[in-house]
Amino acid sequence: MTFRHRLRRDWPLLVMVLPVVVLLGVFHYFPTLGNVIAFQDYSPYAGIRGSEFIGFGNFQRMFAEPAFWKAVANTVSITAVQLAFFFPIPIALALLLNSVLSSKLRNLIQGVVYLPHFFSWVLVVSLFQQMIGGAGLLAQTLRDHGHQAVDLMTKPDTFILLVTAQAVWKDAGWGMIVFLAALSTISPELYESAAADGANRWRRLWHITLPGLRPVIVLLLILRLGDALTVGFEQFILQRSAVGGGAAEVLDTYVYYQGLLVGDFGYGAAAGLFKGVVGLVLVLVANRFAHMVGEQGVYSKS
Amino acid sequence: MSARAVWEEEPTAVGRLGKPVVLALIALAVAFPLYVVVVTSLSTTEAVTRAGGLVVVPRELTVAAYVQLLSGGVVTKALLISVGITVIGTAFSLGITVLAAYGLSRPGSLFHRPLLFIVLLTFLFGPGIIPSYLVVNALGLIDHYASLILPAAISAFNLIVMRSFFMGIPNELIDSARIDGAGEFAILRRIVLPLSKAVVAVVGLFYAVGYWNAFFNALLYINDNSKWPLQMVLRTYIVQQQPLPTGAGGVATGIAGLSPAPGLAIKMAIVVIAIVPVLLVYPFIQRHFQKGVIIGAVKG
């Protein structure tokens, strides 16, 4: 079929896609090109055309800046802690819930644990503040019983555990869905024949359940590793002033403060670009790795 | 209720006792903070004073805090703004998502692969905060409500979810409509949409919750605090603990017949107001929630 024929046949489809293409163009692809200011001594008055190109000057300055490396270190340690303490929880939750026989009870619990996923970060931080903050319920109860009140919301030392606890509270239930779905695809006959062969519940968990979950676990690990430099902007910007930048400065908040609040646009864009490029490389590497160990990964060449 | 399979062992004592306890603790961890916030927001000054802060055991309930907040002032205005953004934004997002999802649901159509690629590529990288800000600024959208809708209007995830659903609709239905002379828009309206109510509802609710919860874009693009949505108000007066402005433009005080509510109840009432819409739509999200929707999307 010639191009003209196809155009005459498919133009309504093209018209339908147009609004989305325009919006993505203006608010995704065009700003992506705008990252050239990372290589400029950008001034908002001169604009991109009027500003001077300084090559890798912003990057050189950034790599020599201890505050930048502090933000990188904070980001990476938060990712590491969340991999260790967050990642297994949805799996454990799914296994626990899957073993509940009553479907009514199961639906009820699911309904409760999914719920916080739909709350905003502002709300989650507010609730944590009311529970374990300086004027919160925990401090209040301790005071009532003659103890020293604690404020777990402003301690830099334990901040990393605080943000992990918040992430667990908000999203562990939601993360469980994928594992529950994967569990439901494991054939019950496998369990039955294993049991007939004398495998007890732990051996069935080890030899049937976990291998059944393996593709999903690998997929989610890849996604998380690819996102290693993204720990969430809102959660940190909300709490940065309470605990200070020493513990709460992550790459995204660093970009925001240096770029927008200090007004050093080119430098902020350089930090943002650094994060984007490293993130992209991480996704590609993690996906390649998944193919190497024989898993499907996020995407495949087709 | 499904019974235990015959080949399964009897549950151990630990399992029989421990499981309900663990499940109850998990449910409590979610429900308890919400409960305390609601009870405190409904408490009188005396009850809050006696409790020394947050109220766990409800005594002397009053709706004074809500009356005060909703009778004009900062919170009323922010609430109206948030509702407006959510309603308009959701309608807009849902409309263009449905159109694009259908437009991309026909493999082999003109430019199908490059257009799909344009959507999928957005998953791999974001444009970054600073360039996005500069574009919104250059378009003159700073302090415009449109800045809370347009940059966040499309979720590629939602678009792909809807597209995979549309692709599952039998081709015979669509082809027979076409033979009857129906154009693409007519097919979308009369054949595809009536068959896709569930996915449209789920995606719409996702968009709505997203708009309602959005705080980042307001922080970046709305400097004028008289245009703040509710989440910004929540952040300023609850998280940052700045005092609520009173009098003109602030919280109305001294409603006839009601003694003013205590500050803490007011604060907790703001939290509750931010939660209630999510709780209202949540049963619908849950009802439509088929695991197929999510899994299909994860596989892409």
Image (tube, coloured by chain):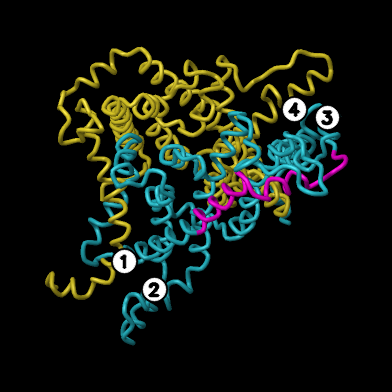
Chain colours: A yellow, B cyan
How crowded pointer 4 is (Cα within 10 Å; few <14, some 14-19, many 20+) is rated as: many
CB-based contact (under 8 Å), mark 2 and mark 1: yes
Crowding at dot 1, Cα within 10 Å, few <14 / some 14-19 / many 20+, comes out as: many
**Mark 2 secondary-structure assignment:** helix
Are the residues under marks 1 and 3 on the same chain? Answer: no
The residue at which mark 4 appears reads as: A137
Type of the residue with mark 3: Thr
Separation of marks 3 and 2 at Cα, in angstroms: 60 Å
Q: Nearer the viewer, mark 3 or mark 2?
A: 3
Tell me if B15 is positioned left or right of B141 in this view. right
**Residue A75 percent location from the top left of the image:** 43, 23
Task: Tell if the residue under mark 2 belongs to the same chain as the one under mark 1.
Answer: no
The residue that label 3 is drawn on is B49
The Cα–Cα distance between marks 2 and 4, rounded to whole angstroms, is 53 Å
Find residue B227 and report its horizontal and vertical position in percent.
49, 45
Q: Chain of mark 1?
A: A
Residue range (magenta): B58-87
Residue at 18% of width from left, 71% of height from top?
A7
Residue annotated with mark 2: B188
Q: Nearer the viewer, mark 2 or mark 1?
A: 1
Dot 2: within a 10 Å radius of its alpha carbon, few (fewer than 14), some, or many (20 or more) residues?
A: some
Q: Amino acid at mark 2?
A: Leu
Q: Is residue A299 located in the magenta-colored stretch of the structure?
A: no
Q: Residue at x 60, y 32 (%)?
A: A125
- Residue named by callout 1: A16
In the rendered image, the quadrant that contains the N terminus of chain A is bottom left
Residue at the limit of the structure toward the front, as seen here: B248
